[in-house]
Amino acid sequence: MKTTKYKASKHFEAAQIQRPYLTLENCAAVIDSPLKMIQQDDGRFVFWGEEQGTGRFLRVVTEADKLEVITAFRDRRFKL
Amino acid sequence: MRINYQADSDMLLISLSDIASDESEEIAPGVVFDFSVTGDIVGIEVSAASQKMDVSRLIADNAVERKNVTATRSEWSAIDAAAQAQGMSRSAYLVHAATASAKQPKAKPMSAPRAKASPGVLAKSISGGQVSVRAHVKRTGKSKGATGSDKKFG
């Protein structure tokens, strides 16, 4: 799995403390194979995808370049 | 409780507990609550925070975070005089000074407007967006100038 092209923002690193399940790798997997993707009005992209091995869903927000991960979390509201 | 604001991404993270988040839910546009395994709220994340609240105070607080503001009694008196001249509490004046300093591109010593003495505690240096507050002598005991609005930094 290639993850080197993705970059964690400072906020993402801070969020990892609160959300220890977050890794750049599992976010990269969602960005690479999203179940759903939208672009916000501010240009940022939001991706939803299954978190590997848990059956839960991650929401990943990136900058407009789709490379810098701003934040991510297990979205308990997301349904297929 | 910890508050972390990143100006570059305009993201605010409030940690209410040291307990880890297990899952989250967006309860309003751009506002996400973090829940523990037991369902307790352990954190709040706000996107586009500057559009939802006044973050200038957060920027200032980040700037002076973990910095001890200590001064002699005479220095505190000078600071209090400067704060009073601007109609501010001591803590509000220190935050105001830090905010103004953080907006400047280069380090510049700040003087206390209309203060009789120049409070050395307000001399600041800025490096990489961080503001350090220097003081000459650690504050000890009670000061006549101290008020209930004192803010402890650090």
Image (cartoon, rainbow, N blue to C red):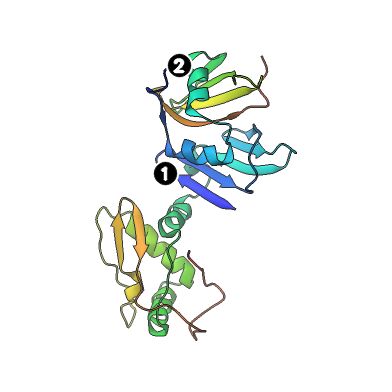
Q: Which mark is residue B7?
A: 1
Q: Which mark is residue A1?
A: 2
Viewer-nearest of labels 1 and 2?
Answer: 2
Image position of A55 with respect to B136: above or below: above
Q: Which mark is residue B111?
A: none
Which secondary structure lies at badge 1?
loop
Image position of B40 with respect to B78: above or below: above
Horizontal and vertical percent position of residue B98: 38, 61
Q: Would you call the spot at circle 2 few (<14 residues within 10 Å), some (14-19), or many (20 or more)?
A: few
The chain to which mark 2 is attached is: A
Disc 2 marks a residue whose amino acid type is Met
- Quarter of image, res B132: bottom left
Instruction: Please give left or right for residue B30 compared with residue B126 in the image.
Output: right
Instruction: Please give left or right for residue A56 compared with residue A66 in the image.
Output: right
Q: Are marks 1 and 2 in contact (CB under 8 Å)?
A: no
Horizontal and vertical percent position of residue B49: 50, 42
Q: How many marks?
A: 2
Of the pair A11 and B30, the residue shown nearer to us: A11
The chain to which mark 1 is attached is: B
Write the residue at 48% across / 53% down: B58
Of the pair B133 and B115, the residue shown nearer to us: B133
Image position of B65 with respect to B8: above or below: below
Horizontal and vertical percent position of residue B146: 51, 80
